[in-house]
Structure formats: structure tokens, C-alpha cells
Amino acid sequence: MLPIPASELNGSGTLGPYWTFYHAVVAEQLKRWLPDQPGLLLDLSGGRGRWPAQAAGAGHHVIEVVDFRRSAAGALRDSSSRIRKVRADDLDFLPDASIDAVVAEERALSLELMAESTIEDVVRVLKPGGRLLACVDSLVLGMAIMAEQNYWAHLCQTGTGEVMLVPWPDGSITRCFTSVQLRELLVDAGLEVEWIRPRTVLSPSTVDHVLAADTRALNWLVRTELEAHPDDDDTVGIHLVASARRPA
């Protein structure tokens, strides 16, 4: 059994010390990843994240696609002078090579089961030299969710290189990736992979223990997380995060 319920593993449950730490890691990673010069950024996180506001605060203009591929087309009222919210089923509303950077946080590519189609759209709208930051569910998470539901026969088939679609207890389905599968997805679409790594390797129990001893240790934990773990290690961590670039 998992130490915490499946509903907690994707961040949708009660926000505890671990998720405070997790979101601090994401914010710092995005801060380090964002282009130095202000540009036009496309956010495909489905309106579930706080990353558009962070990018806008850093001087970028942001097109935030809300409920990507799941809502009727149309523009929403801007929440910021630098943020434009759009509902769309695809990226046809954007010209070729018009975007400086794309962020697909909040497991957007795992929620979109045909991620290949999404990545093709991303490559088309990225300018040469433009970059993508994407977060997906890992194989570790998928195996844990299936074990929690006693899907032992399905677990025997993992690691075969096939696409892994995982049913969640709430009836939803997500697509989980190994680092090899995520790299293939990006490379096959024409992107150059800069790095792939677990979003976090520190366990919830470790984070809870450290923060319980000293709440001021959060920044130290975040620095440790971002500087300690190796690339392409998908044996730990519930999510993988990747950075890729469209060739110039």
C-alpha cells in the first residue's frame, strides 16, 4: 500500500508540508528556466497552475490555454495586462514559429493521452531556438497507483516500452512515462532534449521531518533538490520534468 492516498500523489489532495515544498521546487525551477529576455510564452498547463503569473511577473507576455483540448474555443478576460487566457481545442489559432517558450506543467502531457499530437503543435508554434518545459507522470507513479488498486496483472506488463495508461481511483486515466519514453516523444517531434530528471527525489517523510524541525529550512531543501539529483533517473519521483529546444 502507498504511504499516502492516490488523491494526494498528484497534488490534488490536502496541501501539506510536502506539497508546499513541491510547489516551491517548481517555482524555483521555472525561475531558473525562463528566458533571460522578455518574450512571448505559451502555457499549456490547463489553467491549473500559478506559472503564468510568475512568468508575467518576470516580464514575459503569456498566452494561457485553459482546459487545453477540452473546452469550446474563445478568449477569456485577461487577468493581467501580460496574460491572455484562451480556450482552444488545438493551437491552430497561433502562427508558425510565433512563440519563444512553452510551459506544459501540471502533468499536461500525461492528461493528454495523445501527447504526440500536442508536441507536434508545440514544435510548429515554437520559434527556432525556442524551448519547452514539460512535466509528466512517471512510471513510478503509474506502478504505485496500479498497485494501490491491486492491478497486479497490469504491473507485470510494465517496463516493456509500451504506452502505459493508468486508471485512477476517481475514474480518470493518465499516461505515464519512463525517461526513455519521454525522450523519444520529444526527439521524434524534432526537439533537442536538454535534460530530463525527476521533479523531486526527496520523500514526503524526509521533507516533513526537516520542516517540522525547522520551518526556515524550506529554501535549503529546494536548493538541495535542484542541485543534487542526476538527470534521466526515473527510478524515483512521481513526476518527470524535461527541458527541450527546437533546433535553431
Image: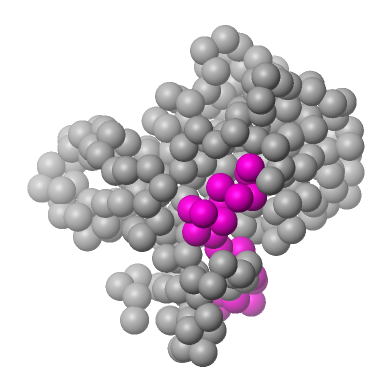
Residue 151 horizontal/vertical position (percent): 50, 87
Can I make out residue 62 in this image?
no
Does residue 81 lie above or below 16 as drawn? above
Residue occupying the far left of the picture: 213
Q: Residue at x 48, y 84 (%)?
A: 156
Horizontal side, residue 75 vs residue 228: left or right: right
As for residue 156 lying within the magenta part, the answer is no
The foreground one among 117 and 77 is 117
Residue range highlighted in magenta: 167-187
Q: Quadrant of residue 128?
A: top right
Does residue 208 lie above or below 54 as drawn? below
Residue 1 horizontal/vertical position (percent): 34, 81
The foreground one among 199 and 158 is 158
Q: Residue at x 48, y 53 (%)?
A: 179
Horizontal side, residue 39 vs residue 226: left or right: right
Q: How many marks?
A: 0
Residue 107 horizontal/vertical position (percent): 57, 52
As for residue 169 lying within the magenta part, the answer is yes
Does residue 73 lie above or below 237 as drawn? above
On-image quarter of the C terminus:
top right
